[in-house]
Amino acid sequence: MEISGKKSLFLILLASVVLFFLFYTIGDVILQTKSYNFMVKHTTGDNIPSDKIVLVVIDDKSLHEIGRWPWKRDKTIDIFDYLEFHTDAKAIAYDAVIMAPDKTNPESDRIFFNNIGKYSKLIAGIGFMEKDFDNYINKEEFNALLPEKSDIEVIDNRTSNDKSQIFYKSFTPFVDEYFKNVKLLGSVNTIQDSDGYIRRIDQLVEYKGRLYPSLGLLTYAKYTGIKNFILDNEYLRGENEEYKVKIPIKSDFGMIYNYIYFYKTKDNMYSHQVISASDVIKSLEAIKKGEEPLLKPEIFKDKAVFVGANANAQALFDIKRTPISDTFAGVDIQATNFNNLLDNTFYTTVSVYYNFFLVLFVFLVVLVFVGVLPVPTALMCSSCAMLLYLLFAFVMYDNRIAIGLILPEIAMLFAIGCGYSMKYLLEGRKKEKIQSAMSKYISKDVMKNVVQNIDSIKLGGKRAEVTVLFADIRGFTSISEQLSALEVTKILNEYFSELVPLIEQHNGILNKFMGDAVLAIFGEPIKNENHPVDAVKCADKMLKKVRRLQEKWLSEGKPRIDIGVGIATGEVFIGNIGSETRLEYTVIGDTVNTASRIENYNKVYRTNFLISEETYLRVQKYVDVIKIREVSIRGKAKKINIYEVLRILDV
């Protein structure tokens, strides 16, 4: 089924749209997060973390010096005692949750639980969960106590449309004594994306109609003295005379989160200063003995201290996959969040609509380049567009605005492929139409030869042996005088429409129409050693076809039309004749004139089918003939024999 040009264009455009949306949908899932990681990693190399943050880590050194894990919990009390009572640290964040008692050391647990409430600077960790409490938990008591564990107020000014369905249904099932005594709890929830990377953190968690702060936010409140925050659809704000923070947030299912702005790491694990927990414990022991502590208390002056664990022991190995490192310490993620709040520095991500229209825009820009510019210029402009977008993306990330990188770049490559595919299809169809139209003016085989040698077409040709067939309608002038121009045209069109295919079927080419006459060539450009035989067989079928047409035309009341055929074989000049601006593929030579003169002798001898002696010698075993006589051919010095073909033999 032939498809119209408009329908073809519509189908191409529809296919492009479908492919674009497929490409965008798949690419958005697979590529956007990878491009985010790439850009964050390559734009955070110079981001220096704050020197107001210190990590106290239970590390391999601590296990080697203090003893293998698990420790008695009173060792943790030693860490808190030193930081709370012997240093001028402004806040202590404990990145851990206590969910089970130490049954082998109940006395140590008793000391830990009884003392945990005495630390005014301490904020401990809490994790919110999507599943409900287990049956053994007194959830009414837990839910009633939880609001007391936060000392900040968040005024929620979001519109109702932004208050999504609540995701969290419970929180970590603490040991009762610990939960009752600890003063402050901050959420340690981080959001792990589908590829396993942590890029976001819950700044606020909506639970049972209240908003609970992250460990970093509660530490920031303790550090700065800001106790009141305002939440709207786009930002979480808080300020006092000395500090001010404005956090770009997004809300989903009770998670009010933001994207983490990471800092330079020294060992792919920590961004901030790290102190081994064993050094803190030994410093306290030294102070109790009246000795000089291993760690000078001044190290912690005006610092926020994050206490956590990260050692090779299975229970303590706490590393996360982040854009800047696949082995980033979990405790440092909490510290990094606090650092963001302290510096008022965050990543702002553009909306999904912005990303979509950005990809669509660069796709269309490059598509326009491909559509309207020459190939070299279009490719140069497209390459420049890709380079400029890369620079633009780096500038945006340097200004902490996260946009897609890989997807727009691939979209531009996709546009190049799509654009040139469309041009190829459209131009191919256009060429087919041109070839189809031109084949009505010149032979299809000549057209094929032209197309195959499109870059080497020039004036000139060659000498070759061919057989020339000349067919003419008898008495056409008097016939045309009896009919109108329209009737004459209809008869000629029907006549030529029936005869021309016969020429092509016998490996010949129609060289030209000359009024009511037909000139056909056999042997070139279609190579064929048996061209005289093909020409004679073609003429025989032409005469038979005319006899059938005669019957039809007579039944329609049209005049009787008869034809004469003359065939000659010999050498001709064949090729492109004319000028540099107008060429014609044709034959020139004595053989052409001979075929025309022989055809004229049909009128003299009242025959329909005459051939030259040269043709006869090449086809004699295929035909039954009558030798007419020697005749004079104008332009030839010697007479030649001509033969009437009576019938084609079955050989």
Image (cartoon, rainbow, N blue to C red):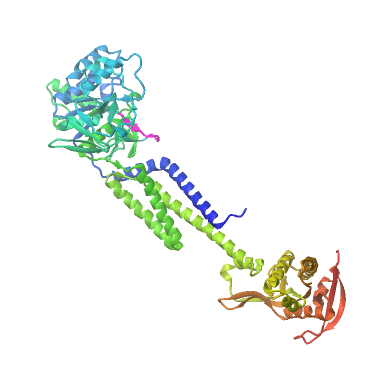
Residue closest to the eye, 544 or 633: 544
Q: Position of residue 592 (x, y in %)?
A: 73, 78
Asked if the magenta segment contains residue 287, the reply would be no
The structure residue drawn at horizontal position 41% and vertical position 60%, both measured from the top left corner, is: 380
| Magenta stretch: dominant secondary structure | loop
The structure residue drawn at horizontal position 28% and vertical position 39%, both measured from the top left corner, is: 261
Residue 627 figure quarter:
bottom right
Q: Is residue 495 above or below residue 334?
A: below
Q: Position of residue 617 (x, y in %)?
A: 83, 74
Residue closest to the eye, 198 or 432: 432
Residue 587 figure quarter:
bottom right
Does the rendering let one see residue 527? no
Residue closest to the eye, 136 or 324: 136
The structure residue drawn at horizontal position 31% and vertical position 34%, both measured from the top left corner, is: 162
Residue closest to the eye, 81 or 359: 359
The structure residue drawn at horizontal position 25% and vertical position 21%, both measured from the top left corner, is: 146
Asked if the magenta segment contains residue 191, the reply would be yes
| 641 lies left or right of 239 | right
| 595 lies left or right of 404 | right
Q: Is residue 3 above or below residue 464?
A: above
Quadrant placement of the C terminus: bottom right
Which residues are the magenta region? 189-196
